[in-house]
Amino acid sequence: MVGSAVMAYLGGIHFWWPKMTGRMYPEGWARLAALVVFLGFNLTFFPQFVLGYLGMPRRYHVYPPEFQVLNVMSTAGASILAVGYVMPLVYLIWSLRYAPIAGMNPWKAKGLEWQTPSPPPTDNFEVTPIVAEEAYAYGTGAPEVYPSGKPASV
């Protein structure tokens, strides 16, 4: 359960990072970190599932010899997982100073939050915007937002 929560947290941080900070992050490093976390997570927990299936009791200070290899694999996976968790910390902190400036909508998302500058101003919009298209009309460009409160053709 913790692994899925941490993965969701990392995904959310990466999605919202340009909006929160006004800076992009190196996408190549992000992909590499995601791969390292995925491999580390599976190498950590898959051997534990196998060990449980084989009947190894929990909380032993010395593992029985038949369980030693899988426990060492799990420990190695935890080390890889730790590296995968530190990588985003490093490149996200780096991006605060050295990364390129993020545009208003680097992901071509449809939400109104992506129609403001990055990072957003205190009030987001000076007037309440009116959206003139479907919420999930992807592939048709940015949403039509009328800051004046009415479409130009009306």
Image (cartoon, helix red, strand yellow):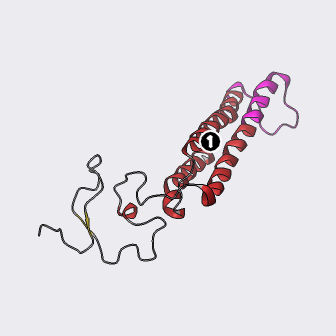
**As displayed, is residue 13 above or below residue 67?**
below
The region drawn magenta spans 53-77
Q: Residue lying furthest top in this view? A: 66
Figure label count: 1
Left or right of residue 103: residue 136? left
**Residue lying at 70% horizontally and 31% vertically, measured from the top left:** 52
- Helix, strand or loop under label 1: helix
Left or right of residue 118: residue 96? right
**Main SS of residues in magenta:** helix
Q: Residue lying furthest left in this view? A: 154
Q: Observer-nearest residue: 35 or 68?
A: 35
Q: Are there few (<14), some (14-19), or many (20+) residues within 10 Å of tag 1? A: many
Rendered location of residue 47, percent (x, y): 69, 29
Does residue 81 show up magenta in the picture? no
**Residue lying at 64% horizontally and 49% vertically, measured from the top left:** 88
**Residue lying at 40% horizontally and 57% vertically, measured from the top left:** 105
Residue kind at label 1, given as amino acid type: Ala
Q: Residue lying furthest right in this view? A: 62
Rendered location of residue 113, percent (x, y): 39, 64
Q: Observer-nearest residue: 40 or 49?
A: 40
**Residue lying at 77% horizontally and 35% vertically, measured from the top left:** 75
**As displayed, is residue 15 above or below residue 130?**
above
Q: Observer-nearest residue: 50 or 154?
A: 154
Rendered location of residue 57, percent (x, y): 77, 33
Does residue 71 show up magenta in the picture? yes
Disc 1 designates what residue?
Answer: 33
Rendered location of residue 109, percent (x, y): 37, 53
